[in-house]
Image (cartoon, rainbow, N blue to C red):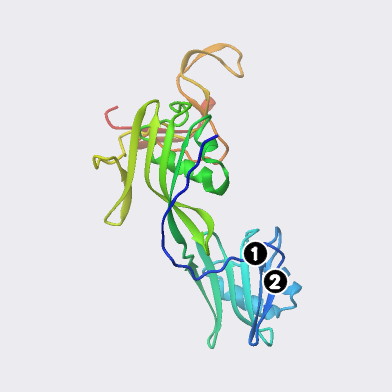
Amino acid sequence: MASILAIVVFLTLRSDLSIISKETPEMTISSEYHEISGHIHKGETLFDIFKKYKLDVKDLFKLREASADIHRLRYLNPNQPYKIILDNYDQINSFKYWINDETILHIMNTEAGFFAEKISIAYEKKIEYIEGTIQTNLVSALGKEKGGLLLALQLSDIFSWDIDFTTDIRNYDIFRIAVEGLYVDGIFKKYGEIVSAEFVNNGERFRAYRYEINGEADYYNEKGKSLRKAFLKAPLSFRRISSTFTKGRMHPILKVYRPHHGLDYSAPEGTPVSASGSGIIVFCGYKGHYGKLVTIRHQNG
């Protein structure tokens, strides 16, 4: 297992959001308003919530109408928080639904009727340092919990022009990362952008530094050169190679030895695949034993 070290460097104090407990829905009562808050259960609809708390269904239709062009309230994701503020007559004052980790749907009851808007979640940012040693693979080293998987994907994307994380990784390779930790009210939510990184692969050292030019961010080495090159080292991030390039491979169906002029990557359905370099698509469709095929013509043949 990797040894992980996290050091808080600085803290930007900014948060106007509160964390809602994942316990059963709660009702908080004040002199003027009371609050219903909780998390969406699997299969639960906003109608179910209104029925549970005996709220006016007419207000539900008004909420749906107000948010129709922003976010359809028919589709609620399980485990996402919500908050309803009611007045003393159980009329809705405001409704909040956390669409995802980035955005909140906020609907307010105004004199002109219900008004809906999307609000970006304001995170506290802490720059953290993470370092470790590869024992099996990058995902295992960073851990799948607390955003480790996405951090591994981000790191592999940064060095994808220099390192094939499927074939090049060796035991005892070393990584060091400075990354944004995103928090709400002091609770870690996820990792943000990698600020800088170092990867020692088979004794060779690679460094990356994030820098923004004209509003576009990219990664550069210590000499200021972009890490982007003409061709990627691999079309997938650290996936398993199921069949290599060979002059004589046992055909899995025909059971005879035949040349295999390519590399087969094994990955879950839906895994993003990148072209190795820029080019022009000359074929896209179904082609015999290749199955679904995209053929790209690159420069210089």
* Image coordinates for residue 134, horizontal then vertical, percent: 49, 32
Q: Residue at x 64, y 59 (%)?
A: 79
User: Is 251 situated left or right of 173 in this image?
Assistant: right
Q: Are marks 2 and 1 in contact (CB under 8 Å)?
A: yes
**Residue 55 placement: quadrant:** bottom right
SS at mark 1?
loop
Q: Which residue is mark 2?
A: 26
Residue 237 visible in the snapshot: no
Decide: is 286 above or below 56: above
- Identify residue type, mark 1: Ser
Decide: is 87 above or below 184: below
The local crowd at label 2, few if under 14, some if 14 to 19, many if 20 or more residues have their Cα within 10 Å, is: few
SS at mark 2?
strand
Q: Residue at x 60, y 74 (%)?
A: 95
* Image coordinates for residue 130, horizontal then vertical, percent: 45, 44
Decide: is 11 above or below 262: below
Q: Which mark is residue 35?
A: none
Q: Residue at x 65, y 76 (%)?
A: 60
Question: Mark 2 or mark 1: which comes first in sequence?
Answer: 1
Q: Which residue is mark 1?
A: 21
- Identify residue type, mark 2: Glu
Residue 93 visible in the snapshot: yes
Q: Residue at x 66, y 67 (%)?
A: 38
**Residue sitting nearer the eye, 290 or 259:** 259
